[in-house]
């Protein structure tokens, strides 16, 4: 029998599918899968042995564990951080305003900050991928950086 509590679960599943199929996520999937597996997309299409497929599956699980780590850290720290910011509300407003003004001056070219022009790509130095540790780190990095679409879907599904 269909219960009202199932609506939240169905909405969450639908939000996940929409998030995955969005134009800012779906094009990235082949590259992520290729890096996580340590093989090119062409090599992934012709995996023959069971052992090779299990290795790719293990890398995928490691990637998902990286995602889960970020979710757990955010969930555990959200309440504490919210309380801290609430207790220092005035100071947080002043600091936030200063940061916004600084970035505005930087974007208009009035203020030149060299550290904002630097780019450090440590991932380029790694050979291939295909290790559980690199898959885990990629999961952490991608979840930390790419939250825009999924946050909108969660917000819509939690109402």
Image (spheres, rainbow, N blue to C red):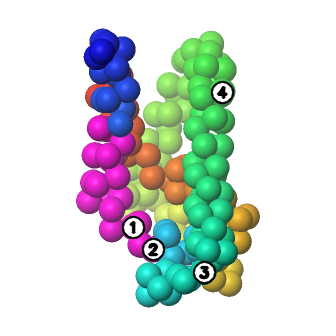
Q: Earlier in the sequence, mark 2 or mark 3?
A: 2
* In the foreground, 79 or 9: 9
Q: Nearer the viewer, mark 1 or mark 3?
A: 3
Q: Nearer the viewer, mark 3 or mark 4?
A: 3
The answer to whether the residue labelled 4 contacts the one labelled 1, judged by CB atoms less than 8 Å apart, is: no
Residue 28's mark? 1
Mark 2 and mark 1: span between their CA atoms?
6 Å
Mark 3 and mark 4: span between their CA atoms?
41 Å
**Quadrant containing the N terminus in the rendered view:** top left
- Residue that label 3 marks: 49
Residue 35: image quadrant is bottom right
Image position of 144 with respect to 90: above or below:
below
Residues rendered magenta in the picture: 14-31
Q: Nearer the viewer, mark 4 or mark 1?
A: 1
Mark 2 and mark 3: span between their CA atoms?
22 Å
Magenta-drawn stretch, dominant element (helix, strand or loop):
helix
* In the foreground, 56 or 93: 56
**Quadrant containing the C terminus in the rendered view:** top left
Q: Is 16 on the left or on the right of 18, as rendered?
A: right
- Density class for disc 2 (Cα within 10 Å; few <14, some 14-19, many ≥20) is few
Image position of 47 with respect to 104: above or below:
below
- Density class for disc 4 (Cα within 10 Å; few <14, some 14-19, many ≥20) is few
Image position of 91 with respect to 107: above or below:
above
- Residue that label 4 marks: 76
Secondary structure category for the residue under label 1: helix
- Residue that label 2 marks: 31
The answer to whether the residue labelled 4 contacts the one labelled 2, judged by CB atoms less than 8 Å apart, is: no
Residue 127: image quadrant is bottom right
């Amino acid at each position: 029998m269909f219960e009202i509590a199932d609506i939240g679960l169905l909405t969450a599943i639908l939000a996940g599918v929409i998030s995955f199929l969005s134009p800012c996520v779906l094009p990235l999937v082949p590259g992520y899968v290729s890096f996580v597996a340590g093989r090119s997309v062409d090599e992934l299409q012709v995996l023959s042995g069971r052992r090779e497929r299990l290795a790719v599956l293990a890398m995928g699980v490691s990637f998902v564990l990286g995602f889960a780590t970020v979710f757990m850290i955010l969930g555990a720290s959200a309440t504490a951080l919210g309380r801290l910011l609430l207790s220092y509300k005035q100071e947080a407003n002043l600091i936030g305003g200063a940061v916004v003004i600084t970035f505005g001056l930087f974007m208009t070219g009035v203020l030149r900050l060299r550290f904002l022009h630097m780019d450090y790509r440590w991932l380029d130095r790694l050979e291939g991928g295909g290790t559980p540790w690199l898959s885990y780190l990629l999961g952490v990095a991608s979840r930390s950086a790419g939250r825009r679409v999924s946050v909108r879907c969660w917000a819509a599904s939690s109402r």
